[in-house]
Image (cartoon, coloured by chain):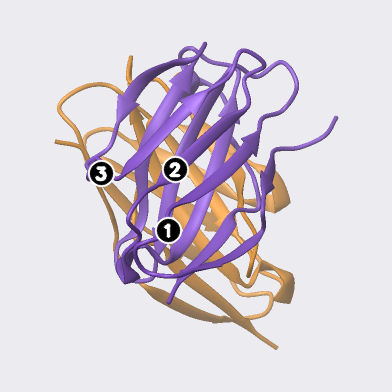
Amino acid sequence: KAGVTQTPRYLIKTRGQQVTLSCSPISGHRSVSWYQQTPGQGLQFLFEYFSETQRNKGNFPGRFSGRQFSNSRSEMNVSTLELGDSALYLCASSLGPRAGSTEAFFGQGTRLTVV
Amino acid sequence: AQSVTQLDSQVPVFEEAPVELRCNYSSSVSVYLFWYVQYPNQGLQLLLKYLSGSTLVKGINGFEAEFNKSQTSFHLRKPSVHISDTAEYFCAVSEYNQGGKLIFGQGTELSVKP
């Protein structure tokens, strides 16, 4: 069974640009969550999607958005990039809807560098 | 509000010695508890989870953890560590009915020396 696939693995963007990251969950998993990992703030929850609906949202500015497609694949978008957005972005998939009660499988992440 | 505190940012230990990584949490409702491991440039891998039932939970790679509700702790232990256990370890909680939202601690860097 294929794991969680995140693309691209590495990305370099310039301040002010926007970026889209992609996550393909494990087959059969319908819940996808996104996390930002930085050395200073650690792992922070961005948002969770289930059946194309956002179920939960973390404390991030509106520049951070996401969506989920009917095949459960998810994308997150960051607009007007800032240097502080440089981070490892992790996607996790689970069976859902009560994903907290089941195992969340993480992808290898997308390393975003904003210059 | 939920919070997770990992009491040690770094834990150096010699190979074959026992280790305990400490985790305390704060929540006003019932929670699920997890320990994840992260190797360099990798995602997170689940070591073990506590959902309900027995408070002693066994996971992969010889790790175990004990849930202590009165002390709101979920410490991770291994009786004998290997060089390959060198990694960062994260404790996480999710609240009942909060779906997939995980709140993570700041991580503990375990360094196993020969």
The residue labelled by disc 3 is B25
Precedes in sequence: disc 1 or disc 2: 1
Looking at the image, residue A24 sits to the left or right of residue B75; the answer is: right
Q: Where is residue A87 in the image (x, y as percent from the top left)?
A: 44, 63
Any part of residue A32 in sight? yes
Q: In which quarter of the image is residue A14?
A: bottom left
What is the three-letter code of the residue carrying label 2? Answer: Asn
Q: Which of B56 and B27 is in front in this view?
A: B27
- Horizontal side of residue B103 vs A97, given as left or right: left
Chain depicted in purple:
A
Q: What element carries label 1?
A: strand
Furthest-right residue in view? A1
Q: Say what secondary structure mark 2 lies in.
A: strand
Q: Residue furthest bottom?
A: B114
B3 is higher (above) or lower (below) than B94: below
Q: Which quarter shows the C terminus of chain B?
A: bottom right
Report how many numbered discs are placed on residues in the image.
Answer: 3
The residue to which callout 1 is attached is A37
Q: Please rate how many residues cluster around mark 1, counting C-alpha atoms within 10 Å: few if below 14, some from 14 to 19, many from 20.
A: some
- Establish if A66 lies above or below A35: above
Residue at horizontal 42%, vertical 58%?
A37
Q: What residue type is labelled 1?
A: Gln
Chain B's colour is orange
Q: Which residue occupies the foreground of this view, A7 or A29?
A: A7
Q: Do the residues labelled 3 and 2 touch (CB within 8 Å)?
A: no
Q: Quadrant of the N terminus of chain B?
A: top left
Reading the image, the residue beneath label 2 is A77
> Residue A25's image quarter?
top right
